[in-house]
Amino acid sequence: MHRNRLALILAASLIVAASLGCSLVGRAVDSATGGAASTLQAVQSELEQALATLPAEIGGGLPTLPDDLGGALATLPVQLPGAGDTEGTISGSLSYPSEGIPPLRVVAFDYLSGEAAASVETAAGESSYSLTVPPGMYMIVAYTLDGRLAGGYTTAVLCGLSAECTDHTLVPVPSGLGLPAEGIDPGDWYAPEGTFPPAP
């Protein structure tokens, strides 16, 4: 009888001790992780608020390109908006199909009108030039001072001026907004007569 009561008391004590232990451990864990849990809840709350401000549908979707892209590009102005009177520079190297480089006149022709817009004369032996031009598109041609020979900045120059480079079309050069156009070398002295505008 006494043994049964002692067993019951001992069992109850063990249960109470285990319960207290679990409670203490739980409080310790809550204390250790409480900061992280509150931070996580704050981040989750901010994320939910941000998502709530997004529209249900992003209006309009992506813009569509016109079917006739070439026609659309043709309507763009040659002169960029806001270019104003800000000039640009065109520069490059000079050459000549003989020993030495004679005095040359380098001319920038307006690509649309074909009129001479700017020019500069170089001395004998000079191997470079620089032109200041208004905003626009230009064709660059170098002439001997007597105007008899001409070298242009053409597709053949971009091709490397090898025997296979037979296209002598002048390449349009954009300039303006204060930006330099460099490496524009009028070195195609091999174009058929009449390919380039006459010397101004």
Image (cartoon, rainbow, N blue to C red):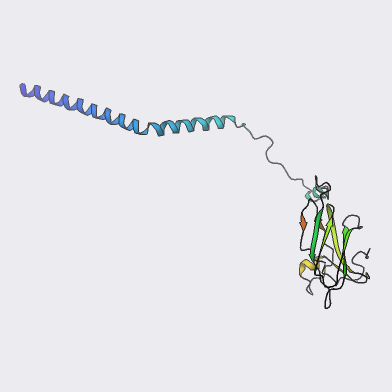
Q: Decide which of 116, 16 is in the foreground and name it.
A: 116
**For this view, does 178 lie left or right of residue 36?**
right
Foreground residue, 176 or 19? Answer: 176
Task: Place residue 146 in its image quadrant.
Answer: bottom right
Quarter holding the N terminus?
A: top left
Q: Residue furthest front?
A: 123
Tell me the quarter of the picture where residue 15 sits: top left
Residue 147 percent location from the top left of the image: 93, 69
Query: Where does the image place residue 59, in percent across and percent down from the top left?
Result: 67, 34
Q: Name the residue: 21% across, 29% down.
A: 18
Judge whether 160 appears above or below 64 on screen: below
Residue positioned 26% across, 29% down in the render: 22
In the rendered image, residue 20, in percent from the top left (x then y), is placed at 23, 26
Q: Is residue 101 above or below residue 114?
A: below
What's the residue at 34%, 31% (across, down)?
Answer: 31
Quarter holding the C terminus?
Answer: bottom right
Q: Vertically, is 146 above or below 61?
A: below
